[in-house]
Image (cartoon, rainbow, N blue to C red):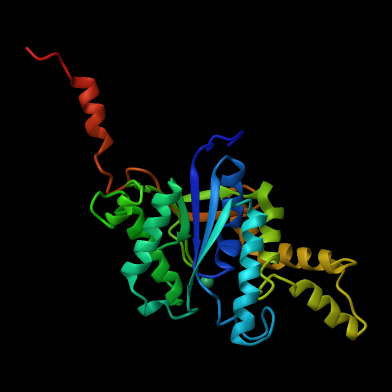
Amino acid sequence: MPGRPHSGKVLLAVQAHSDDIPLSASGTVAKLIEEGYTGYLVRATNDDMGDAVGLGTPGTIGDAVIGNEHDNAEIARVLGCKGHFDLNYNNHRMADVSLNEVIGRLIFLIRLLKVDTVVGWDPWAHDEENPDHYTIAKALEAACWMAGRSHDFEEQFAAGLKPKTVQDKYYFARRPEITRVVDISQQVDKKIDAIRANVAKGPGGHSGSHLRAELAQHNQRLPLLGDDDLAADRNYIREFSLAHNRELGKQYGVEYAEVFHYIPANASGGERDTRIDQYIKQHVVPAK
Ligand SMILES: [Zn+2]
């Protein structure tokens, strides 16, 4: 949308790992912030398991923690977020953390920041293999609803917080049920920079410059990777990491797209069906 139609609204982007939002939704997060949202980034784990063999920066478990902590802060900055929060659960171990504890922490953030819209993993999606993804997804879905109620975690009200429901939800998934397509063609450079900030984890990060150096050892080069490390990293991400966004774009008639299971306000669980208020407005008469 042109201008800043979302001024005054608050966006909470919730990821399990430092690369979830960059890969799946960073174009949309950047776009919503450009359109006026005040954005915050939440990372549920400490990313201490690093990533797949051959991706990112090799090192110990501790190296993965500190590397991803720095990377995540950079991702928040690149996307224009006002702040970020690290919940610090162990990577790949969220399957048996207390779901109610995670829900309670998200409810606190929703009420504290007065969140209007969330972006996160889809709790209803298929093909998900990572327990951190489906655990934080379930917690976020529950928190969006429970945060608006007047008895859940009511001790938070004594600290000055107020109930706050979130009914506007952009959920991403490995095999998404697509109900909203976002044109991110204008936000591609920010998405590339967010993926480039995943140095510790890959799969973007410095993969391009590493490949360029590897080829040079064999006296070879790829024109795609340009003449310096920055160009190599950015062009590698544009070509390979964004291939799926280009394919989606082609399908929906734009250059680059991200897709979501989008749940709009009043789709379910509203405090009161807005049709009741509409009915009253249309039919109310003076009492005799
Ligand atoms: Zn992840």
Tell me residue 59's x, y (percent).
Answer: 67, 86
Identify which residue is drawn at 46% across, 62% down.
176
- Which of the 4 image quadrants contains residue 209? bottom right
Identify which residue is drawn at 45% across, 74% down.
132
Identify which residue is drawn at 37% across, 43% down.
265
Residue 79 in sight here? yes
Q: Say above or below: 143 vs 9.
A: below
Q: Say above or below: 273 vs 216.
A: above
In the rendered image, the quadrant that contains the C terminus is top left
Compared across the picture, whether 166 is left or right of 59 comes to left
Identify which residue is drawn at 54% across, 70% down.
17
Tell me residue 282's x, y (percent).
Answer: 23, 21
Foreground of the two, 163 or 278: 163
Foreground of the two, 221 or 85: 85
Tell me residue 261's x, y (percent).
Answer: 44, 55
- Which of the 4 image quadrants contains residue 205? bottom right
- Which of the 4 image quadrants contains residue 211? bottom right
Residue 138 in sight here? no
Compared across the picture, whether 111 is left or right of 87 comes to left
Tell me residue 185's x, y (percent).
Answer: 66, 49
Compared across the picture, whether 270 is left or right of 207 comes to left
In the rendered image, the quadrant that contains the N terminus is top right
